[in-house]
Structures are given as structure tokens and as C-alpha cells.
Amino acid sequence: TILINPEIEEQLDEALAQCESQLDEFTSGGSGWAMFKVLRIDVETAVYKPFGGASYIPTPDFIPKGSVVNIRNEDNRCFQYAVLASLFPPTTPSGKNNISRPGVYKEHMDKVNLDGITYPVTESYYKKFEKQNPTLALNVFGIDRKTYYPIHISNHIDRIHVDLLIIQADLPEGEVNQHYL
């Protein structure tokens, strides 16, 4: 399964190496056979709509008040804002929390490496995010009414853990908007 373009070449190289290995194993076993040419390669594709956060969705009533930080963003950067809210909880000079405004995170935008990660961020980028940010471990959960379920749990126990929740809202024409908290 290939989820993002940069994986295509890597996966094709891996598939070719596997074919060559199986062919070598078969012919070295004394079959007397030799490969002359490849007649056909089948590639199957399908539309994949992964989880991916976009713009603001109000926190559902079934999520306890104060248990999550929900950034009121109008761009597709809710993943970045949610990570920054976890790492850099903001306060105003008067000491009042301003945690739901995207502007309070602007000074920290370059403190996580999101190179090559496109918005809205989908689960295909979670491991890349962890690789590019070697001090962070990412855990992402979904929720269906009051049942939380894991979408991605990091293998890195010795890092700073960032726990995100992704929620969704149905839009007209069957589309879905998703948002990280």
C-alpha cells in the first residue's frame, strides 16, 4: 500500500528486489529455468480517504470541558497548532490562558519540523513527523461518542509524548471535516 508519492519509487524497488530474490531462489534450486522477459506488471489503485485534520470544528458536547485544547484555526494547520498547544501552553501577559487562538502559537511555528508534510495532515505522515522530530512521540486517538480508540501509538517511550485527538463533522454531499485537538 502506497499512501504518499515519495513512497512509490521505494516500494517499486522493494517489489523488484523481492521478485529477483524469488527468481534467484527458484533457479538456484536446479530448476534449469531462466527468465527471458517480463510480459506484464499489474498495479491496482483505489481511492483512499484517510483521517486528516483540517479547520476548526467545535468540541462535541460529549467531550468533557477543559479536557482538550481546541484551536479555532481557519487554515488546514490544526495538526501543527495541536502539537504546539501540547508543547507550548500559552498565556497572555495578564496570565489568562489564550489557548484556543492560533495567533498565540505563531512564535513557535518553526519549533517542529514539518518539512514535506502536507496539509491537512493524514495518518500516512505520523511516522515521518516522528522521524523528523526525534525528541517527540506522537499518539493520535479518535472518538466515537464516548469511546476513544487509538489511530497511532508511538513506539518511542523515551521521548516527549504529544497526545492528539481527531474529531469529525459531516458536511454536505457526504464530505467529512476532521480536526485535531
Image (spheres, rainbow, N blue to C red):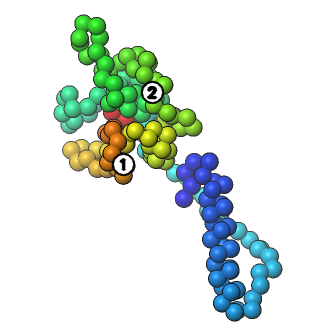
| Residue extending farthest top | 94
SS under mark 2: helix
Please state the total of marks drawn on the protein image: 2
Label 2 crowding class (10 Å Cα cut-off): few <14, some 14-19, many 20+?
Answer: few
Which residue is found at the position 41% from the left and 16% from the top? 103
Q: Are marks 2 and 1 in contact (CB under 8 Å)?
A: no
Which residue is found at the position 37% from the left and 16% from the top? 104
In the depicted view, which residue is nearer to us: 69 or 127? Answer: 127
- In this rendering, does residue 42 appear at all? no
Which residue is found at the position 65% from the left and 60% from the top? 12
- In this rendering, does residue 8 appear at all? yes
Above or below, 131 relative to 64: below
| Residue extending farthest right | 36
Name the kind of residue labelled 1 in the image. His
- Name the quadrant of the N terminus: bottom right
Percent coordinates x, y for residue 141 in the rendering: 32, 45
In the depicted view, which residue is nearer to us: 26 or 164? Answer: 26
Percent coordinates x, y for residue 61 in the rendering: 21, 33
In the rendered structure, find residue 156 and report the number of the disc placed on it: 1
Lateral position of residue 70 relative to residue 19, left or right: left
- Name the quadrant of the C terminus: top left
Name the kind of residue labelled 2 in the image. Lys
Kindly report the distance in space between the C-alpha atoms of the residues bearing marks 2 and 1.
Answer: 19 Å
Q: What residue does disc 2 label? A: 111
